Amino acid sequence: MTAAPIVMDPLARDNAAEGALLRAAGPVVAVELLGGVRAWAVTRHGAARELLTDARLVKSATHWAAYQRGEVPKSWPLIGLAVPGPSMVTTDGAEHRRLRAIVAQAFTPRRVELMRPQIEKITAELLDGLTAAGPVVDLKSAFAFPLPMTVIGTLLGVPERDHELVRSLYERFFSSVASDVQATIAALNAFVAGLVAERRAAPGDDLISALLAADVEGGALTDAEAAATLRVIIAAGHETTVNLITNAVRALLTHPEQLALVRAGEVEWAAVVEESLRWTPPTSNFLFRFAAEDLPYGDVVIPQGEAVLISYNAIGRDPDQHGGTAELFDLTRDAARHLSFGHGPHVCPGAPLARLEAAVALPALFERFPGLALAVPEHELSPNPTMVVNSLRELPVRL
């Protein structure tokens, strides 16, 4: 790389400011991640739309030159995200279509809509629990986490006793500062491998059994593919929605004039979901794609073998896409044109489920607790130390 890279904050202390800095530097900019790992960041909406459909950017880490040369150690805190197992996230072309087809069958809009009554029931039960626990609760732990975790756990057949284990493992997995990354990866692998082995031996009426039984063109899932796919589904099935709900509640409580609009019926709750996805995307930076050949874009050339991350922090507030008020949380804008669930062949197949869960949870929460307010000043809220997901450690609220 010839340009001096922008050093990204592994502690994610100000995602909005960092996104603005990256965006101002250009549509594709050189960056330095924790541990001195170099990459390129895509920072503008238009560039992301183009590059996320460019066949020269591939998903397999076999193309990552620095990793193949041993310059990125297996102890790098984000290695589990940069070099995961063989799943739809790490493949392209026909192999990606084979693995994605098996998963996508479970998340069609029709099948997701059929889950609405169950999501409403889980939401009501959690709100009852909040009433008993109040008046001050950590809304992330008591509501935003258990809702999607219970939904995806029920869908997959993951018992409730394992939900807190899953949460702790994934918090460490996404952390930019964890020191035991290989132990975390090993624990996650052992957990999902155990689920696969159980369903191979005794299939049930759950998504894991259906995934293992599915036979599409190119063959059924191997155990390794099934385990890697489960890691993806569990992570995407709860982490994205936890952050979506948490970030949306924070945005509404710190923008009372916007909350008043939705309460008055002047905007729909769907607008809250989409504007929250744009303004504070649940995934802040997505790792990685790799240049299979020298890739020119604008004034720069991404050299063959280098890593590329998609900075949804920067892209979501791109004024070229969202106008001069892109930095503002505004429920009256057309925010549905955001890219926070990705774009192109790898767009998130679980997006309809995340949207439905948030669209059920948010109005139910504010209807049950019309006086909901932050229990601490906003500046005292603490971000999770991760440059990958956009999350808070906790969200203390007064019911």
Image (cartoon, rainbow, N blue to C red):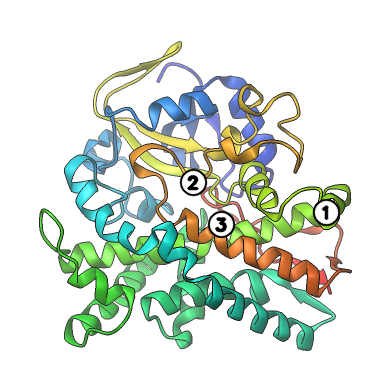
Viewer-side label of 2, 3: 3
Query: In the figure, 3 relative to 281: above or below?
Result: above
What residue is shown at x 39% (from left), y 27% (from top)? 51
Mark 2 or mark 1, earlier in chain? 1
Classify mark 2: helix, strand or loop: loop
- Three-letter code for the amino acid on which mark 1 is drawn: Leu
Would you name the residue on which mark 2 appears?
A: 341
Query: In the figure, 188 relative to 19: above or below?
Result: below
Residue 122, x across and y down, in percent: 59, 79
- Three-letter code for the amino acid on which mark 2 is drawn: Phe
What residue is shown at x 53% (from left), y 59% (from top)? 354
Horizontally, is 300 left or right of 124 in the view? left
Mark 2 or mark 3, earlier in chain? 2
Classify mark 1: helix, strand or loop: helix
Residue 168, x across and y down, in percent: 50, 73
Question: Separation of disc 2 and disc 1 at Cα?
Answer: 24 Å
Residue 383, x across and y down, in percent: 67, 55
Horizontally, is 169 left or right of 301 in the view? right
- Three-letter code for the amino acid on which mark 3 is drawn: Arg
Query: In the figure, 245 relative to 47: above or below?
Result: below
Which quadrant is the N terminus positioned in?
A: top left
Question: Separation of disc 3 and disc 1 at Cα?
Answer: 19 Å
Would you name the residue on which mark 3 appears?
A: 355
Would you name the residue on which mark 1 appears?
A: 259
Residue at the extreme left of the image, as rendered: 218
In-front residue for pair 344/268: 268
Residue 176, x across and y down, in percent: 51, 53
- Please say whether residue 87 is visible from this viewpoint: no
